[in-house]
Image (cartoon, helix red, strand yellow):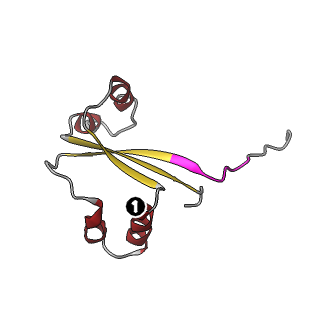
Protein backbone atom coordinates (compact mmCIF):
# COMPACT_ATOMS: atom_id res chain seq x y z
CA UNK A 1 0.00 0.00 0.00
CA UNK A 2 1.20 3.54 -0.76
CA UNK A 3 1.81 6.54 1.45
CA UNK A 4 -0.33 7.92 4.19
CA UNK A 5 -3.16 10.35 3.47
CA UNK A 6 -3.51 13.13 6.03
CA UNK A 7 -6.49 15.42 6.22
CA UNK A 8 -6.41 18.54 8.33
CA UNK A 9 -9.86 19.11 9.83
CA UNK A 10 -10.75 22.82 9.92
CA UNK A 11 -11.94 24.44 13.14
CA UNK A 12 -15.10 25.62 11.41
CA UNK A 13 -17.09 24.47 8.39
CA UNK A 14 -19.95 26.16 6.55
CA UNK A 15 -22.89 24.15 5.27
CA UNK A 16 -25.76 25.47 3.18
CA UNK A 17 -29.22 23.99 2.79
CA UNK A 18 -32.16 24.95 0.64
CA UNK A 19 -35.61 24.40 2.11
CA UNK A 20 -38.55 24.35 -0.32
CA UNK A 21 -42.15 24.63 0.86
CA UNK A 22 -45.61 25.27 -0.52
CA UNK A 23 -46.62 27.26 2.61
CA UNK A 24 -47.94 30.75 1.88
CA UNK A 25 -46.43 32.15 5.07
CA UNK A 26 -43.55 30.93 7.15
CA UNK A 27 -43.36 30.83 10.95
CA UNK A 28 -40.67 32.94 12.58
CA UNK A 29 -37.71 31.41 14.43
CA UNK A 30 -39.53 31.94 17.73
CA UNK A 31 -41.92 29.14 16.75
CA UNK A 32 -39.11 26.62 16.38
CA UNK A 33 -39.57 24.91 19.78
CA UNK A 34 -43.25 24.16 19.13
CA UNK A 35 -42.50 23.08 15.57
CA UNK A 36 -39.89 20.41 16.40
CA UNK A 37 -40.54 19.59 20.06
CA UNK A 38 -38.25 19.79 23.04
CA UNK A 39 -35.66 17.09 22.36
CA UNK A 40 -31.92 17.42 21.86
CA UNK A 41 -32.31 18.44 18.20
CA UNK A 42 -34.72 21.23 19.13
CA UNK A 43 -32.39 22.52 21.84
CA UNK A 44 -29.41 22.49 19.45
CA UNK A 45 -31.39 24.27 16.72
CA UNK A 46 -32.64 26.90 19.19
CA UNK A 47 -29.10 27.50 20.43
CA UNK A 48 -27.85 27.87 16.85
CA UNK A 49 -30.63 30.32 15.99
CA UNK A 50 -29.79 32.38 19.06
CA UNK A 51 -26.16 32.62 17.92
CA UNK A 52 -24.57 33.77 14.69
CA UNK A 53 -23.85 30.14 13.70
CA UNK A 54 -27.14 29.70 11.85
CA UNK A 55 -28.63 32.15 9.37
CA UNK A 56 -32.08 31.65 7.87
CA UNK A 57 -32.97 33.84 4.89
CA UNK A 58 -35.95 33.80 2.57
CA UNK A 59 -35.05 33.53 -1.11
CA UNK A 60 -37.42 36.12 -2.55
CA UNK A 61 -36.14 35.95 -6.11
CA UNK A 62 -33.97 32.98 -7.09
CA UNK A 63 -30.95 34.17 -9.05
CA UNK A 64 -29.89 32.56 -12.31
CA UNK A 65 -27.04 30.86 -10.44
CA UNK A 66 -29.45 29.41 -7.87
CA UNK A 67 -31.76 28.16 -10.62
CA UNK A 68 -28.77 26.46 -12.26
CA UNK A 69 -27.89 24.85 -8.93
CA UNK A 70 -31.46 23.57 -8.59
CA UNK A 71 -30.96 21.46 -11.68
CA UNK A 72 -27.77 19.91 -10.30
CA UNK A 73 -29.49 18.69 -7.13
CA UNK A 74 -29.68 14.97 -6.58
CA UNK A 75 -33.31 14.02 -6.07
CA UNK A 76 -35.55 11.01 -6.55
CA UNK A 77 -37.34 10.96 -9.92
CA UNK A 78 -40.10 13.54 -10.05
CA UNK A 79 -38.99 15.38 -6.90
CA UNK A 80 -36.73 18.00 -8.48
CA UNK A 81 -39.71 19.67 -10.16
CA UNK A 82 -41.35 19.95 -6.74
CA UNK A 83 -38.29 21.73 -5.34
CA UNK A 84 -37.94 24.10 -8.29
CA UNK A 85 -41.67 24.83 -8.40
CA UNK A 86 -42.13 25.39 -4.66
CA UNK A 87 -43.93 28.53 -3.57
CA UNK A 88 -41.19 29.50 -1.08
CA UNK A 89 -37.46 28.81 -0.81
CA UNK A 90 -35.42 29.42 2.32
CA UNK A 91 -31.63 29.45 2.45
CA UNK A 92 -30.14 28.08 5.67
CA UNK A 93 -26.43 28.60 6.34
CA UNK A 94 -24.79 26.92 9.33
CA UNK A 95 -21.22 27.53 10.46
CA UNK A 96 -19.47 25.74 13.30
CA UNK A 97 -17.16 22.96 14.33
CA UNK A 98 -17.32 19.87 12.09
CA UNK A 99 -18.69 17.70 14.91
CA UNK A 100 -21.51 20.20 15.44
Residue at 59% x, 60% y: name it.
99
Q: Which residues are magenta?
A: 8-14
Residue at 45% x, 61% y: name it.
51
Which residue is nearer to you in this view: 11 or 72? Answer: 11
Q: Residues within 10 Å of mark 1 (few under 14, many from 20)?
A: some
Q: Is residue 11 left or right of residue 31?
A: right
- Number of numbered tags placed on the structure image: 1
Which residue is nearer to you in this view: 31 or 74? Answer: 31
Residue 24 location (% of width, % of height): 13, 48
Q: Is residue 78 magenta?
A: no
Q: Quadrant of residue 75?
A: top left
- Which residue in the protein does label 1 denote? 49
Q: Is residue 28 left or right of residue 52?
A: left
Which residue is nearer to you in this view: 3 or 30? Answer: 30
Residue 74 location (% of width, % of height): 40, 37
Residue 41 location (% of width, % of height): 41, 68
Residue at 44% x, 55% y: name it.
54
**Circle 1: element type:** helix
Majority secondary structure of magenta residues? loop
Residue 11 location (% of width, % of height): 65, 53
Amino acid sequence: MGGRFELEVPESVTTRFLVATQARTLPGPGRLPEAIGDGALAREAAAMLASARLVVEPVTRPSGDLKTRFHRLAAPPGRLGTVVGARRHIAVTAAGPPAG
